[in-house]
């Protein structure tokens, strides 16, 4: 029963993407989703590794299903893509994932395919409730029904406090740190290209007030570019003629704490995607015990909640094809959680005041 409707966005409106980092002095952060992905995923090693680490973990998590056919449908590849990995990555980056249900000749669910989220728009009714989704590639548009027991598409979205129909990804929250990290990489590249040309100025002070002639200025400029620019001339001493002196104009990398700035930006990127920095090889204590704890924290705080969101949404969307559909991660088969499960089993086994049925329920095993 629909108790209250709400005023939705105009029909077919695209989601308002995050605009984090717009005030960063390093430059305005790209505002379209594709531009953000190019800068924050394609062009940033930390963000790309963080997303892949979470998405691949979700895809490799052992899944239990109420129906073997349902489990096979979720695990099968469609169009060469691993469904759970694609959906997890889309939720992290965009905040929305759309899984199309491809049907066979008899109307059954034949395959599942993850659509590109930036190509999908929600159609809403007068009360603001979603009724269908439009998928557009170039000039071609396809309308996918969202109502009924067997919808054409399953919409999975993350929490968004400012939108009723579209989720919010992590890429916007990481945008400022990504901009800093990318700028640091460009700065290092420029430093290698101009290694022996410090940031400063040559000051001509002959004492008699005469200025450099045009020919002298051009010759000095050409000698500087030929003799002192480029990584091959790194560390080469500079010989100044009479009347010329060097005056530094900018802070050195040590003064700017440049290494620390880049490391802090990398850790912030990892934080935005829910990945312990240690697992990305960032500076910090990397003993085996701490690494193991970091891996357990990744599963507990990031992978399992994300996998639970995806599997629950898929089970609800496919309930029209599989009665009583349920999908969940089998915690007993997750290697990172083996020690936790051993402690749970030991404590439950030692509880003599519990019945066998109660013990089975506590460890997640049905009657």
Image (spheres, grey):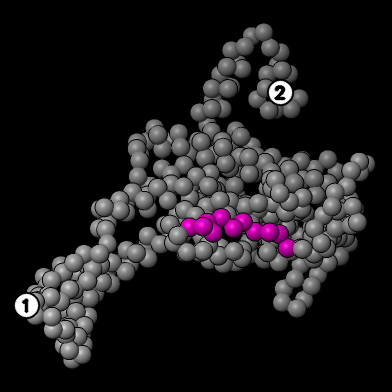
Classify 10 Å Cα crowding around label 2: few (below 14), some (14-19), many (20 and above). Answer: few
Residue 361 is tagged as: 2
> Does residue 104 belong to the magenta stretch?
no
The image quadrant where one finds the C terminus is top right
- Residue 304: in sight, yes or no? yes
Q: Eyeballing the image, is 122 above or below 272?
A: below
Q: Is residue 80 above or below residue 150?
A: below
Residue 219 visible somewhere in the drawing: no
Instruction: Examine the structure image and report whether residue 15 is included in the region drawn in magenta.
Output: yes
Q: CA distance from mark 1 to mark 2?
A: 89 Å
User: Residue 324's x, y, as percent?
Assistant: 83, 40
Secondary structure of residue under mark 1: loop
188, 97: nearer the viewer: 188
> How far across and down, in percent of the image, does residue 366 sit?
74, 27
Residue 65: which quarter of the image?
A: top right
Q: Is residue 121 left or right of residue 147?
A: left
Residue 7 at x, y percent in the picture: 84, 52
Residue bounds of the magenta highlight:
14-24
Q: Is residue 180 above or below residue 344?
A: below
- Determine whether label 1 and label 2 are within 8 Å by CB: no
Q: Is residue 101 above or below residue 294?
A: below
């Amino acid at each position: 029963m629909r108790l209250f409707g709400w005023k939705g966005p105009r029909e077919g409106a695209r989601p308002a993407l995050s605009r984090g980092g717009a005030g960063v002095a390093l430059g305005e952060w790209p505002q379209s989703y594709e531009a953000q992905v190019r800068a924050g995923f394609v062009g940033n090693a930390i963000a790309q590794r963080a997303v892949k680490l979470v998405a691949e973990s979700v895809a490799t998590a052992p899944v239990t299903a109420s129906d073997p056919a349902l489990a096979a449908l979720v695990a099968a590849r469609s169009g060469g893509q691993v469904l759970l990995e694609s959906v997890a990555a889309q939720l992290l980056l965009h905040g929305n994932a759309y899984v199309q249900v491809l049907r066979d000749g008899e109307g059954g669910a034949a395959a599942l395919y993850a659509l590109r989220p930036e190509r999908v728009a929600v159609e809403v009714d007068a009360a603001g409730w979603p009724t269908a989704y439009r998928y557009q590639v170039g000039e071609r548009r396809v309308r996918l029904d969202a109502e009924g027991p067997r919808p054409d598409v399953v919409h999975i979205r993350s929490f968004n406090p400012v939108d009723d129909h579209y989720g919010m990804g992590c890429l916007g929250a990481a945008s400022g740190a990504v901009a800093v990290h990318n700028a640091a990489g460009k700065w290092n590249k420029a430093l290698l290209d101009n290694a022996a040309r410090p940031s400063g100025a040559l000051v001509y002070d002959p004492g008699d007030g005469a200025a450099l002639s045009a020919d002298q200025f051009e010759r000095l400029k050409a000698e500087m570019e030929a003799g002192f620019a480029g990584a091959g001339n790194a560390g080469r001493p500079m010989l100044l003629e009479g009347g010329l002196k060097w005056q530094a104009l900018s802070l050195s990398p040590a003064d700017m704490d440049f290494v620390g700035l880049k490391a802090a930006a990398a850790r912030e990127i990892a934080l935005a995607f829910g990945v312990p920095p240690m697992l990305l090889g960032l500076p910090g204590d990397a003993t085996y015990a701490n690494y193991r704890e970091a891996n357990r924290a990744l599963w507990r705080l990031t992978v399992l909640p994300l996998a639970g969101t995806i599997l629950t949404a898929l089970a609800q969307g496919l309930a029209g094809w599989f009665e009583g559909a349920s999908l969940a991660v089998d915690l007993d088969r997750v290697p990172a959680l083996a020690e936790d499960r051993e402690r749970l089993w030991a404590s439950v086994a030692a509880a003599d005041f519990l019945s066998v049925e109660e013990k089975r329920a506590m460890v997640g095993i049905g009657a």
